[in-house]
Image (cartoon, grey):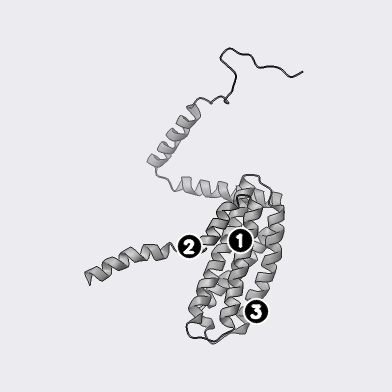
Amino acid sequence: MRLLLTLLLVALPALAQKDFLTADEVDQVREAQEPNDRLKLYVKFARQRIAMVEQFLSKDKAGRSAMIHEALDEYNKIIEAIDTVSDDALRRKVPIDLGAVEVAKAEKDFLAKLEKIKGAKTRDFSRYEDVLSNAIENTSVSLELAQTDAQARSKDVMTKDQREKKEREEMMTPAEKAEKKAVEAKEAAKPVRKAPTLRRKGELEKKPY
């Protein structure tokens, strides 16, 4: 009994950390450093998860509801990743116009298919109803964000970041606030490093003519 409990304690964290992407998909995301390319990749992965759900629904087999639930759960996390990549790019002032257009176009299609799945009301619908409802809601919100003007969305992201920062600071203890101020003061006091140069010591910079 004790051995079984130990094995479960070891296994549970691993299960909780299960990635929503396959190893190959993770490699593709790592290679796609440009936000627009990464957004297009996530759209591709989301489309594959929708196709998987449709395939599972096409055959009334025992246990399919668990596979539908898993595919929809992965889909939800992919949609969240799309929004995270977009917000991060806007924080860094990196244009994502091409990616946003691709996302908006795809999510309109995803939303229509998810609504169709909801309307089908299969015999095992109750087993994946909640995760399907989340998928519809997440897709609707993500679609709205993708259709929002980049400048307005960037402003919203900054406002959200400032609000969350303020909330974190309000939850700090006096000791934590004092420590934070000390760290910020220390960082501000650091000398600014000069840009590296190939000139020898004492050699003047040549002025362009």
Q: Residue at x 60, y 57 (%)?
A: 83
Q: Secondary structure at mark 3?
A: helix
Give neighbour class at mark 3: few <14, some 14-19, many 20+ (Cα, 10 Å): few
Q: Which mark is residue 42?
A: 1
Residue farthest right in this picture? 209
Relative side of 12 to 98, left or right: left
User: In the rendered structure, which amino acid carries the disc numbered 2?
Assistant: Asp
- Quickly name the residue at label 3: 116
Can the viewer see residue 162 in this picture?
yes
Q: Residue at x 42, y 45 (%)?
A: 172
Give neighbour class at mark 2: few <14, some 14-19, many 20+ (Cα, 10 Å): few
Q: Secondary structure at mark 1?
A: helix
- The residue lying toward the viewer, choosing from 179 and 14, is 14
Question: Cα distance, mark 3 to mark 2?
Answer: 27 Å
Q: Residue at x 26, y 71 (%)?
A: 4
Q: Which mark is residue 19?
A: 2
Can the viewer see residue 148 in this picture?
no
Up-down: is 194 above or below 123? above
Which of disc 3 and disc 1 is earlier in sequence? Answer: 1
- Measured as percent of width and height from the top left, residue 145 is found at 66, 59
